[in-house]
Image (cartoon, helix red, strand yellow):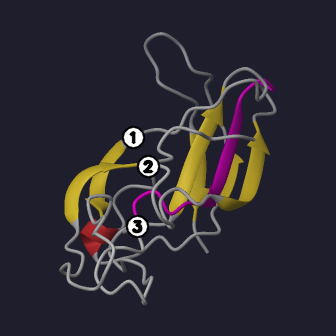
Amino acid sequence: MLVSNGASGLPFSANAANEPAVAIDPIHPNVIAVGANDSIDQPLCNAGDDHDCGPSFKAGTSGIYFSSNAGASWTQPTYTGITARSCTGVPGDSDPDCVEAVGPIGTLPNYGEVGMRDDGDPGVAFGRGATPPTATSPGPTARACTT
């Protein structure tokens, strides 16, 4: 699977997706959900001290992606939540530490807002009532959880 939206080409850690979990909808086998560790909402290593590539403990790291055509193409939903995407910094140690903000996120929503953290290794599954994407519905009803 190649997920290219969100990849910035800037210093790690933006969009370093890995360790995927896959679920195929048994009723609509062309519909696939993938959960993976995803650093799209984490600060770049240039943010703050360049010798410390630390994560944001408020922004999530569990991405979710969908295909409605058996994996020929993929989408990553955009939600609103706590993100550190704007923490890009500059080379050297003179830039300030990252300050997270509310904005577009590519990871699971509503964790940081209630004092929790989605911390990667998501599992995905389809349950009863799963529906394929249509012109009026953006995607299948899949469940994702973090471990």
* Residue 85 higher or lower than 45, as above or below: above
Residue 66 drawn at (x, y percent) = 62, 35
Give residue 106's mark.
2
Vertically, is 50 above or below 62?
A: below
Q: In whole angstroms, how far apart are the C-alphas of marks 1 and 2?
A: 5 Å
Residue kind at label 1, given as amino acid type: Thr
Judging by the rendered image, the residue that carries numbered circle 3 is: 42
**Residue 100 lies in magenta, yes or no?**
no
Residue depicted at x 67% and y 53%? 124
Q: Amino acid at mark 2?
A: Gly
Q: CA distance from mark 3 to mark 2?
A: 10 Å
Where does the magenta region start and end? 28-42
Percent from the top left, x then y, of residue 71?
A: 76, 29
Which residue, as the protein is rendered here, is positioned at the far front? 92
What residue is rendered at 68% in x and 61% in y? 18
Relative image position of residue 63 (x, y in whole percent): 54, 54
The residue where tag 1 is placed is: 78
Place of residue 8 in the rendered image (x, y in percent of width and height, measured from the top left): 46, 48
